[in-house]
Every structure is written in C-alpha cells, then in structure tokens.
Image (spheres, grey):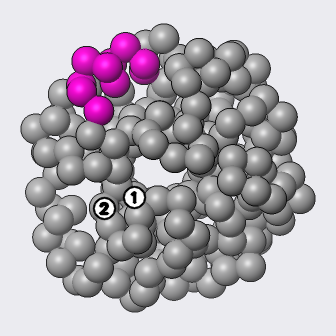
C-alpha cells in the first residue's frame, strides 16, 4: 500500500481532516516557509492527532541539538531534512530519518547512495513547497524506501504512482486553498486517488 504524507500542516482542523481522510503521516515545517509552525504550535496540533498517524518534522540545516529538542518536545516520530545536511549529520538521530534530495538529472542515484537513512524523499529541483514536478522517469526503478514529492496533486498522483511505484507520496501545495491552509476536499480526493491505485 502506498503511504500518504500530507505536509505543511499548520492547524488542528487540517490535521484532523487529513487523518480522517486516511493520511498515514502529517508533516510539520520548522524551516523558513509560509507553512512554518513553532514547536509550541506543532505540539498543540500533534496532541489532537489520533494514534497511529506518524508525525514528521521538516528541517533545513538546523543545528542538531535544536532538532533533538524540537523532536522531543513535539513528540515527533520522524525527521525530514531538506538542506545540505551531511550523511554524518543524518546518522546522528534516534528517530526515523528521511533525507530530501532535489532531482535535476540522473545523478540523483549517486546522491542517494551517499546517505544511509530510513527513506529518501525525491523533490523537484526548485525545492519543497513550490508545487513543481520533476521528470518522473528520473525516479523510475528507484523503489527502495522512496517517497515521491514535488508538484503532486489529486489530478496527477495516480499517474505518478503508476510511473514510479514509490513507497510513499508527499503532498503540500497540491491540496491547499492558500499557503498553509488545506482544502479538505482536495485531501479527500488525493487520498482516494492513491488508494484506487493500490487496488
């Protein structure tokens, strides 16, 4: 079954809607972004989430001790790194680690080989939160612990899954009505279209 992560959660209503629609994971952005939340905000939202929904903190070039403090205070299950973090840095945590890699060309495979992490998130070269896709054929055949991101929407996610067969998919802007505010109908459509591919 393809795992689904709804990223850029900024409020309780969106978190609960995503969980009720069947999202497997929710992402909370602690890096500079229109979707950025404070640790206090994230902690409050996370306290309302049903059990068995994975919570993921998104960071970019943050001091490791700061990441550890936020992970502990917010009770994060996983850490997602979107910056220039080194392989050594990524090995320094006691939680699930996801390394985001921006896809430009086939060198993405060499970049992935540098890291020994729990999962790899492939995003567009423009970076997270831009709503831009990349050429999915560059990810074809990379199935091990691969999370596909970058410009996914309810309209294109089924095609993306059929093309890449990823372990999981990650969406943020593709299910928003405005930056940081989710459209609950689009979340529902996104989840339904992913699950249809799983049948």
**Region rendered in magenta:** 62-71
Q: Is residue 197 above or below residue 8?
A: below
Image-quadrant location for residue 97? top left
x and y, in percent, of residue 154 in the image? 74, 71
Q: Residue at x 24, y 25 (%)?
A: 64
Nearer to us in this view, 195 or 4: 4
Tally the numbered discs.
Answer: 2
Query: Do the numbered discs 2 and 1 sit on residues whose CB atoms are within 8 Å?
Result: yes
Q: Is residue 157 above or below residue 185?
A: below
x and y, in percent, of residue 8 in the image? 61, 45
Relative placement, left or right, of 89 versus 2 is left
Quadrant for the C terminus in the image: bottom right
Q: Which residue is mark 1?
A: 121
Image-quadrant location for residue 31? top left
Q: Is residue 67 above or below residue 173?
A: above
Magenta highlight on residue 136: no
User: Could you say which disc has been placed on residue 145 in the image?
Assistant: none
Q: Which residue is mark 2?
A: 101
Q: Residue at x 82, y 48 (%)?
A: 21
Q: Is residue 12 above or below residue 185?
A: above
Q: Residue at x 34, y 84 (%)?
A: 138
Res 150 seen here: yes
Give the main secondary structure, helix, strand or loop, of the magenta stretch: helix
x and y, in percent, of residue 149 in the image? 50, 65
Residue at disc 2, secondary structure: strand
Quadrant for the N terminus in the image: bottom right
As measured in the structure, the alpha-carbon distance from the residue carrying label 2 to the one carrying label 1 is 6 Å
> How busy is the neighbourhood of tag 2: few (under 14 within 10 Å), some, or many (20 plus)?
many
Nearer to us in this view, 138 or 181: 181
Q: Residue at x 23, y 83 (%)?
A: 106
């Amino acid at each position: 079954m393809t795992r689904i992560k709804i990223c850029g959660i900024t409020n309780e209503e969106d978190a609960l809607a995503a969980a009720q629609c069947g999202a497997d994971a929710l992402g909370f952005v602690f890096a500079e972004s229109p979707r950025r939340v404070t640790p206090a905000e994230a902690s409050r939202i996370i306290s309302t989430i049903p059990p068995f929904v994975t919570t993921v903190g998104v960071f970019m070039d943050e001091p490791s001790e700061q990441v550890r403090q936020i992970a502990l205070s917010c009770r994060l299950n996983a850490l997602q790194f979107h910056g220039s973090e080194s392989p050594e840095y990524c090995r320094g945590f006691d939680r699930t680690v996801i390394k985001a890699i921006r896809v430009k060309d086939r060198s993405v495979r060499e970049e992935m080989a540098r890291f020994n992490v729990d999962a790899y998130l492939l995003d567009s070269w423009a970076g997270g939160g831009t709503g831009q896709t990349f050429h999915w054929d560059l990810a074809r055949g990379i199935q091990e612990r691969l999370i596909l991101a970058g410009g996914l929407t309810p309209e294109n996610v089924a095609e993306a899954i059929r093309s890449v067969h990823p372990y999981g998919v990650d969406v943020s802007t593709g299910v928003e009505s405005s930056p940081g505010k989710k459209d609950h109908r689009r979340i529902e459509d996104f989840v339904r279209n992913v699950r249809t591919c799983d049948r």
